[in-house]
Image (cartoon, coloured by chain):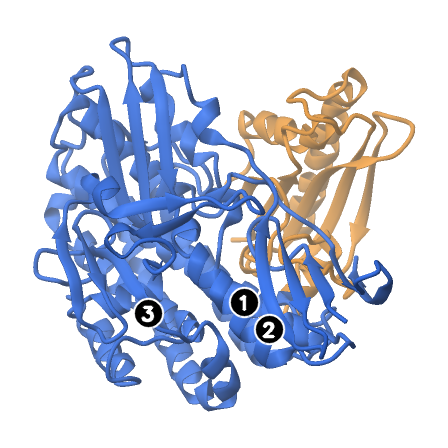
Amino acid sequence: MPKVLVICYGNPLRGDDGVGWIVAEKLKQMPLPDFVTVQTHIQLAPELTADLSEADLVIFVDARDAEPVGVVSCKPINPSPSTPSSFSHHLTPELLLSHTQCLFGRAPKAFLISVNGSEFGYQDAVSPAVREAVGKVIEQVLKLLEEFASQSA
Amino acid sequence: MAQRIVIEPVTRIEGHAKITIQLDEDGNVANTWFHVTQLRGFEKLCEGRPFSEMPSLMARICGICPVSHLLASGKACDQLLAVRIPEPASKLRRLLNLAQIVQSHALSFFHLSAPDLLLGMDADPQKRNIFGLIETNPQIAKDGIRLRKIGQTIIELLAGKRIHPAWVVPGGVSEPLTVEKRDQILSMLPEAKEIALRTLQWFKRSLEDFRDEIRTFANFPSLFLGLVTPEGKWECYHGRVRVVDENGHIVADQLDPTEYHEYIGEATEPWTYLKFPYYKPMGYPDGMYRVGPLARLNIIDGFDTPLAEQEWVEFRELERGAILSSFYYHYARLIEILHAVEKMEELLNDPDILSKHVRAIAGLNNLEGIGVAEAPRGILIHHYKVNEDGLMEWANLIIATGHNNLAMSKGILQVAKHFIKGKQLNEGMLNRVEAVIRAFDPCLSCSTHAVGHMPLHIQLIGPDGTLLDELRRD
């Protein structure tokens, strides 16, 4: 059976950075196909390579500090061995894919859905514009899942 | 002309610290200070909260070892209820602690220290990290990632989530273990055991390459302190305190951990937020002791699982008395991972582990409670006092990293004296100073409840304030 991972990541105590957690919560309440797993993480960590190596498609959902606030973008991403941080737990999706490729000999097809945000201070709620964007993110995730299902059929 | 070197912050440890190194007029190291510069003070902020909130609240101290705080806090709350928790609950809590030891030790060994061990202390710091390891030693990196994931997945299966779970409650645990989850955990353990054995074999073969580090990494006499079973075997959840000296002789045994204040004192120094616990009968600072994996393997009479026991016998043959070099913390961690996996198998094959009777219900019966357990980094003590309404009035937490503070400070001086020469700094020198701290795997977020760190900035400053040399990592 094919496997799809939706990885929603960010810090829910840092305002708009927590949008992924809201998306994940809504997705978990929906009747998604059995092959879809939704995960939430505060940040991407090397351990995720093991999960990625077993997936056919990975959809990352994150916030980014950009204007105009609330705009949702979606792009395919590829493994990229960019310069790593000196620290052990800060990773980009592209670098995570690269490590998956390096360690397990394969990396899944992947997309990054980003939501533009502006409030990243200490607060446990996202800004109104980002909250409004949640529906668009869900739509985008469902569209990718549909495309994947039709390609796998 | 005396000079001063400052390493700030120390990297690849959990939390924020800096090191000051004082040079004498000839450029030799005269003294060192290990400063812990941040404070969150959980003891203070929990005042006024209901004691039932304490396990979940205390787990927030740390994202690496929340389970340890959860357990020590749960045990302190059990005392407030004055209950003896059901045996299955005790076994489930023990299981959780073993999984925690696996994931935390895997993080320390593979992610934080293996880059030094495999890529070399003098390697480019941009490459000397888990990512560099993935490129150069993918099998070791993969093993580390798998092992940590296995530990975290077990925690998640048992406690609902891998970080900050709320499954441990006063009186036991909130949910029993299901057959499905037990079988799922059991299915992961053979791989974990294979990784632990493979890594141990590799590490033992590599020891010859680290003769200098073994000789100089906090290699001095000290006491060692931790929990043992009544039979003197390795223990991580209950047990009583044993203290052993540098010759491996037992100084004190079967001490009641809840009477810790009788034999552990806490000194303070003006240049750090981290206290200096010491063994009271020997005074401060002579009562310096070490805790954690190395100490645990020094104090015990053995393991009660076959593979770990076999490795422990070989480990103890390294020296006649106690194993003194803190470099061997890494070795001890690997043996503990192996034992944790064996012990989890044993516990999961016990039918009692599936019992539905996992929580004792009671109201407040004591106004004071003390919980003690072995965290991955060493013995952890939570001590609470509450009022008649069950609201917290006072808390004292003594954390593994605090216990090791005196030894870490002395270790830094030893390694700095050996590796730092002259007025020019280089990464290799400074990394060894940091690496001795990493050997202890300190968690400063726990010990001072401080938040993290980022770049590294080192300055060599002359007595007149002139900047003589500088290194920066962004």
Q: Which residue is mark 1?
A: B412
- The percent coordinates of residue A19 (x first, y second) are 69, 29
Q: Depth check: give the residue in front, B192 or B277.
A: B277
Work out which residue is located at the far left of the displayed protein and give it: B231
Tell me, yes or no, if residue B146 can be seen here.
Answer: no
Alpha carbon distance from label 1 to label 2: 6 Å
Q: CA distance from mark 2 to mark 3?
A: 37 Å
**Visible residue check, residue B203:** yes
For label 3, the residue is B193
Q: Position of residue B331 (x, y in %)?
A: 39, 74
User: Label 1, label 3: how many angstroms apart (C-alpha)?
Assistant: 34 Å
Residue position for label 2: B416
Q: Chain of mark 1?
A: B
Which chain hosts label 3? B
| Relative depth, front residue between B75 and A14 | B75
Question: Which one of the lettered chains is coloured blue?
Answer: B
Chain letter for the orange part: A
**Relative height, residue B43 to residue B120 (above, below):** above
Q: Amino acid at mark 1?
A: Ile
Q: Horizontally, is B210 left or right of A80 in the view? A: left
- Determine the secondary structure under disc 3: helix
In this picture, residue B383 sits left or right of residue A104: left
What is the chain identity of the residue bearing mark 2? B
The residue depicted at 47 percent of the width and 41 percent of the height is B163
